[in-house]
Amino acid sequence: MKQDSRQGERAAWDARQGDRLSVGMDVHKRTIAVALADAGRGEVRSYGVIQNTPDAVAKLVRKLGGAERLACCSEAGPCGYGLQRQLEGLGASCIVVAPSLIPRRPGERIKPDRRAAMKLARRLRSGELTAVWVPDAEHEALRDLSRAREAAREARHRARQQVRKLLLRLGIAEPGATRAWSQRYWAWLRAVQLAPPRQQVVLVDAIETVDAATARLTRLEAQVKAAAATGRPAPLIAALQSLRGVGVITAVTLVAELGDRSRFATPRPLMAYVGLVPSEHSSGDSQRRGRITKAGNRHVRHVLVQAAWHDRHAPKLTQALLKRQAGQPTAVTDVAWRAQERLHARDRRLAGRKGSQKAVIAIARELIGFVWALARAQAEPEDPTTAGVPAATAQAA
């Protein structure tokens, strides 16, 4: 009976496919290996290799009998989403799949382009592939800008560390009562003179590298702040800044990296997406949970943990926070105030038992849940009778 059930399910799947043609594409810089799988159980066949150009892709679509019957897929990789956008623009269906989520047979070691394309076509026909979210051109540009700023911040950090390690190696003690990289520290650093002329050249070059990295970071941060005030994501970016610890840079990072929030029906899948849920190794009656998976988006995870440290302090509407919340709907400010109360109380409970490091990870996990709730509140229509009333004021009244 199980075999009959599987055969019935397979027949229903085949009926839904109709005359759909599954097209697997192994994309490279100059070429695309193409494989085809007809609806049903027919053999997957290699079509060959075409040039990775818009004209060649359009010609392929015409040769395969029109875009309406094509279901295409390609792996996410360095070639970006240009192929997916072109195929969607021509009228074909196209998904981009994560290489790590493609089923693989044990012991599979051989992967030429032809086999990779045939494997994609076969898995696509059977419905075994998991598609990733593909941003549009505007959203991808915002994400690239956000990541460029983060790369600049990391580059400045490395440059600063090189200067300090050089001084440490040469036995030059830094001024004890001066905070690193403050104005007084910079005045002391520029006055340092090394006896060997060649070492002085190295020190001056390292300082200039820090100056250049700082200037680059300043330029990119200005561009990020300008981008936050324009475009479709601007209202959501402004609303996210109602949360304590979430400034414009953090808000832009969240919007740019998380993308379409409607993908997550509840906060729990979003928590797993950013890798903040505990790993688990359970079998039978034994349940073992370990550290967080770190399997998701590291950019989001980093800014969430940094923002979570602010919830060590008691709930309070500071002047800076009130300025960021100005003009936001009551539903948004209510979520932000509930986040302060709950996250601070949770930090007080966990910090003593688990330590501050584990507590802040738990706070970051719950914070992404409030980000989800705030995004939904921002998208809902506002009640005009309570517009602009801060949550704390409304509760006091």
Image (tube, grey):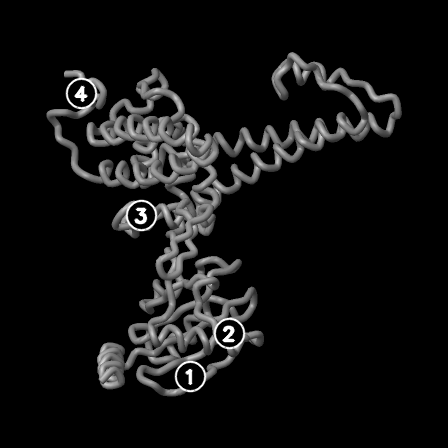
Looking at the image, which residue is at 34% across and 21% down? 321
Neighbor class of circle 3 (other Cα within 10 Å; few <14, some 14-19, many 20+) is some
Query: Which is more N-terminal, label 2 or label 1?
Result: 1
Q: Residue furthest bottom?
A: 42
Decide if residue 75 is on the left or right side of residue 179.
left
Distance CA(mark 2)–CA(mark 4): 59 Å
- The percent position of residue 314, horizontal first and vertical second, equals 35, 20
Q: Nearer the viewer, mark 1 or mark 4?
A: 4
Sequence-wise, the earlier of marks 2 and 4 is 2
Q: Amino acid at mark 1?
A: Val
Q: Residue at x 79, y 30 (%)?
A: 202
Q: CA distance from mark 3 to mark 1?
A: 38 Å
Residue extending farthest left: 385
* Residue on which disc 4 sits: 395
Q: Is residue 231 visible?
A: no
Sequence-wise first label, 4 or 3: 3
Q: Position of residue 134 (x, y in %)?
A: 38, 56
Which label was assigned to residue 106? 2
- Tell me if mark 4 has few (under 14), some (14-19) or many (20+) residues whose alpha carbon lies within 10 angstroms of its own: few
Residue linked to disc 1: 44
Q: Nearer the viewer, residue 58 or 159?
A: 159
| Looking at the image, residue 16 lies above or below residue 342 | below
Q: CA distance from mark 1 to mark 2?
A: 21 Å
Q: Amino acid at mark 4?
A: Gln
* Residue at (47, 42) in percent of width and height: 299
Within 10 Å of the Cα at label 2, are there few (<14), some (14-19), or many (20+) other Cα atoms?
few
Q: Amino acid at mark 3?
A: Arg
Q: Tell which circle, 3 or 2, labels the residue nearer the N-terminal end.
A: 2
CA separation, marks 3 and 2? 31 Å
